Image: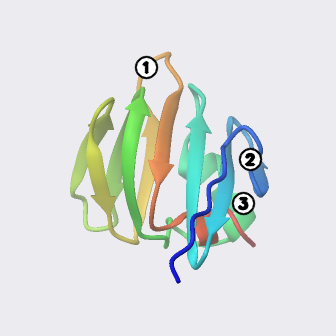
Amino acid sequence: MAGLDSKNFDSPDETRAFDNGQMQLITLGTGTVGRSVFEPGWKWSENVKPIVGTDSCQVAHFGYVISGKMHIVMDDGTEGDAGSGDLVEIAPGHDAWIVGDEPCVMVDFQGAANYAKK
């Protein structure tokens, strides 16, 4: 028999805070989705790297940018921006930072469960 379940980011299952931002996580069934708020000045290599201890972000992301803008640089030198309204897929092995003075709010459907964990 099929079921129905819902949760709201106003009451997340978990919140992971890091300098200049946070990720709120909700788990439904076997899936975990995260909503992140990255404040101006946030940079993965400065604000999350000390938590996880890797040279670059090793989490794969598949997400939707609600607002703001993020610049991503892959370990191979490929780079680009993800901004408001964009759907983005980011492979493991990258750094990223916020562009401009608006927070970047992103919903991550793939990498949230392992993001910003020791």
Judged from the image, the secondary structure of the residue bearing numbered disc 1 is loop
Q: In what element is the residue under mark 3?
A: helix
Q: Nearer the viewer, mark 1 or mark 3?
A: 1
Q: Is residue 104 above or below residue 89?
A: above
Front label number (3 vs 2): 2
Q: Residue furthest top?
A: 101
In the picture, residue 9 is in which quadrant? top right
Which amino acid is tagged 2? Phe
| Mark toward the start of the polypeptide (3 vs 2) | 2
The kind of residue tagged 1 is Gly
Q: Is residue 24 above or below residue 33?
A: above
- The numbered disc on residue 10 is none
Q: Alpha-carbon distance for marks 2 and 1?
A: 19 Å
Q: Which mark is residue 100?
A: 1
Residue ID at (72%, 60%) = 50
Q: CA distance from mark 1 to mark 3?
A: 23 Å
**In-image side of 47 versus 40 (left or right):** right
Residue 67 placed where, x, y %?
Answer: 42, 27
Residue drawn at 72 percent across, 37 percent down: 10
Mark 3 neighbour density, 10 Å: few (under 14) some (14–19) many (20 or more): some
Which residue in the protein does label 2 denote? 18
Residue 44 x/y as whole percent: 55, 50
Residue depicted at x 61% and y 68%: 28
Q: Does residue 24 appear left or right of residue 84 in this picture?
A: right
Left/right placement of residue 83 relative to residue 60 reads left
**Dot 2, how many residues are within 10 Å of its Cα: few (below 14), some (14-19), or many (20+)?**
some
The amino acid type, in three-letter code, at marker 3 is Pro
Which one is in front, 44 or 85? 85
- Residue 18, position in %: x, y? 74, 47
What percent of the width, then of the height, locates residue 89? 29, 60
Q: Which mark, by number, is residue 50? A: 3
Q: As displayed, is residue 2 above or below residue 22?
A: below
